[in-house]
Each structure stands twice: as structure tokens, then as C-alpha cells.
Image (spheres, rainbow, N blue to C red):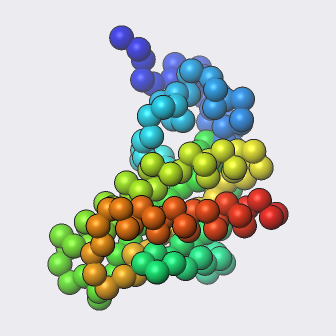
Amino acid sequence: MEEKYLPEEEHEDVRNLPFLTKNDLSNPVYSCYFGNKATFGSQERLKREKIIEQLFKEGKVIHSNCLTLVYLPIALNTHFPAQAMFSASKKKFKHAVDRNRAKRLMRESYRKQKIKLYEELVAQQKQMALSWVYKHKELLDYTQVYQEMEGTMERLLRVLQQK
């Protein structure tokens, strides 16, 4: 059975890198991070309060019809090129079930589309903090959220490529 985790020595080496390099993407050792599996693990989630505060103070914004993306190029304490968080307004969705559904749809859409962003960030050797905010008044179905996410992701990639 294939090991899912890195051996201790290699894991220590990975911690010393600010993030993975383009050559590491093809390495089978890191397939659990970037391979054919499109996962969204705990190290890819933005949780640090200090970074979140800085993101909303200094970050730049991309709007779409139902999503708002706040992004900030910043050094993260992880080897992943980006960390993301997802939120839905309590004012627009009174029931927690609806807020959780909106966040779940955004997470799934991001999980399937993040590899393009990761490749661009690794090529530029940057790291980025992202916050996705669901701003539509009603719950949309998955295909609509996926298309909105795709549109904002393309706009973010264009901004990255211009720099």
C-alpha cells in the first residue's frame, strides 16, 4: 500500500521551503498535494487571524455577480502556494444550513479549479491568501457557482500574469 504521508526527513525539508517549486509538482512524493487528486486539506485553509485581518485591510478585490474574491500576495507559513477561506453572510442567509451549503459549493468549485492558480503561483514563486465571499441573496446551484468561480479565477490569473 502506498504511503500517504512524507517520511520524516523529507517532511522536515518541505517545512524549510517557503513553498513547493515547479519541479516538485512532478515528483511522485508530492502527489498527495498536487497529483491527480484535487484535494482541499487543512494546510490549504486560511485560519490565521493575523493574516485574515491583513487580507481584509490591504487585499485587492475582484467582484462577480454572486462572489467576491479578496486576495493578497503574502508569505504564508505553508508549502502550498495559496490558502483560502470561504464565507457567507448571516444577514443574507438566516439559517446556518443555507450558509453551510453556500460555503460547501464554493469550496468544491475552488477545489476543482485551483490547480491553474497553483501552477501560476509556483511559476512566479509567490504565495497568496484568498477569501471568497458569497454575496448573492439566494442559493444558486452548483453549475452557476462553478461558472462564477471560474470567471473570478480567470480574472485573478490575468492580474497575476500582468505583474
- Could one spot residue 73 in this view of the protein? no
Q: Name which quarter of the figure residue 60 lies in.
A: bottom right
Q: How far across and how far down the image is residue 63, in percent?
A: 55, 79
- Which residue is the extreme one toward the bottom? 91
Who's the residue at 45% across and 64% down the image?
147
Q: In the picture shown, does residue 139 fall above or below 156?
A: below
- Could one spot residue 35 in this view of the protein? yes
Q: In the picture shown, does residue 21 fall above or below 5?
A: below
Who's the residue at 62% across and 36% down the image?
15
Q: How far across and how far down the image is residue 86, in percent?
A: 41, 66
Q: Is residue 99 left or right of residue 53?
A: left
Q: Nearer the viewer, residue 7 or 135?
A: 135
Who's the residue at 60% across and 48% down the image?
116
Q: In the picture shown, does residue 154 fall above or below 54?
A: above
Q: How far across and how far down the image is residue 1, in percent?
A: 36, 11
Q: In the picture shown, does residue 49 fall above or below 61?
A: above
Who's the residue at 61% across and 62% down the image?
154
- Which residue is the extreme one toward the top? 1
Q: Is residue 102 left or right of residue 60?
A: left
Q: Name which quarter of the figure residue 72 lies in.
A: bottom right
